[in-house]
Amino acid sequence: MRTLSECRLYGIIDVGYVESSDGTRVVERMIKGGVDLIQLRGKGRSIDQLADLAAELHELTAESSTPLIVNDYAEIASRVPVEGVHVGQDDDSIEVARRKAGRQILVGKSTHSVAQALAAQREGADYIGFGPIFATPTKPDYPPIGLADIRRVHEEVSLPIFCIGGINIDNLQSVIDAGAKRVVMVSALLKAHSIVDYARCATDMLA
């Protein structure tokens, strides 16, 4: 399985944008385009629905050594052999997520400031999401934090850091120039005319 240190482009399958029935097709396109790490996010879906979808997607991601992360629900990791769980500031603690999974998994945490990033590192996160860098329809309640702290968080936190929030091909270079090494793409990737071509363009820029 690909390690986090090897990962540059993190794709999220958000069922708000993608029908569950279309999940496998989207994952196939992401993998073909070079997405290194994939997360399944399904706000408002039941754990059973998400576990079924995660099991289906994991068959594809495992073949390509692409880690599959589930958002919020660590219980899914006790039922499906996904590689990890991602939690937010208001979700389970990292310790609780690991306990619910009942096995060794990756746990990532969303952070919205350098202080939260440092706290996540102390808490034992395997990686952090840092943002939202720009305004994003996926997280309308969070004000964008901008580019200013990207270099600082990379200096102070030793974990893999994935910048997230409104990142697309048009602004990706500015994020890289601000110090980012890894990014998450959600709506820009999912709504792209060609997910494969869009992902390849992003991975070329991050190389």
Image (spheres, grey):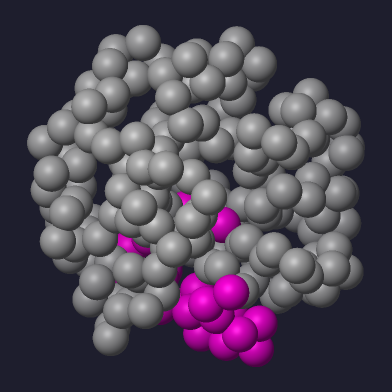
Q: Is 72 situated above or below 114?
A: below
Instruction: Give the quarter of the image for residue 50.
Output: bottom right
Q: Is 186 situated above or below 128?
A: below
Q: Is residue 183 visible to us here?
A: no
Q: Is 49 situated above or below 36?
A: below
Q: Is 177 situated above or below 9?
A: above
For image coordinates 23% across by 66% down, the residue present is: 200
For image coordinates 61% across by 74% down, the residue present is: 15
Residue 36: say if magenta.
yes
Instruction: Give the quarter of the image for residue 132.
Output: top left
**x and y percent of residue 68 in the render?**
60, 55
Q: Is residue 176 visible to us here?
A: yes
Instruction: Give the quarter of the image for residue 147.
Output: top left
Tell me if 134 is positioned left or right of 4 in this view.
left
**x and y percent of residue 7 in the render?**
38, 44
Tell me if 108 is positioned left or right of 79 in this view.
left
Q: Give the range drawn in magenta.
A: 16-39
**x and y percent of residue 163 in the render?**
36, 40
Residue 178: say if magenta.
no
For image coordinates 23% across by 76% down, the residue present is: 197
Front residue of 148/39: it is 148
**x and y percent of residue 162 in the render?**
39, 39
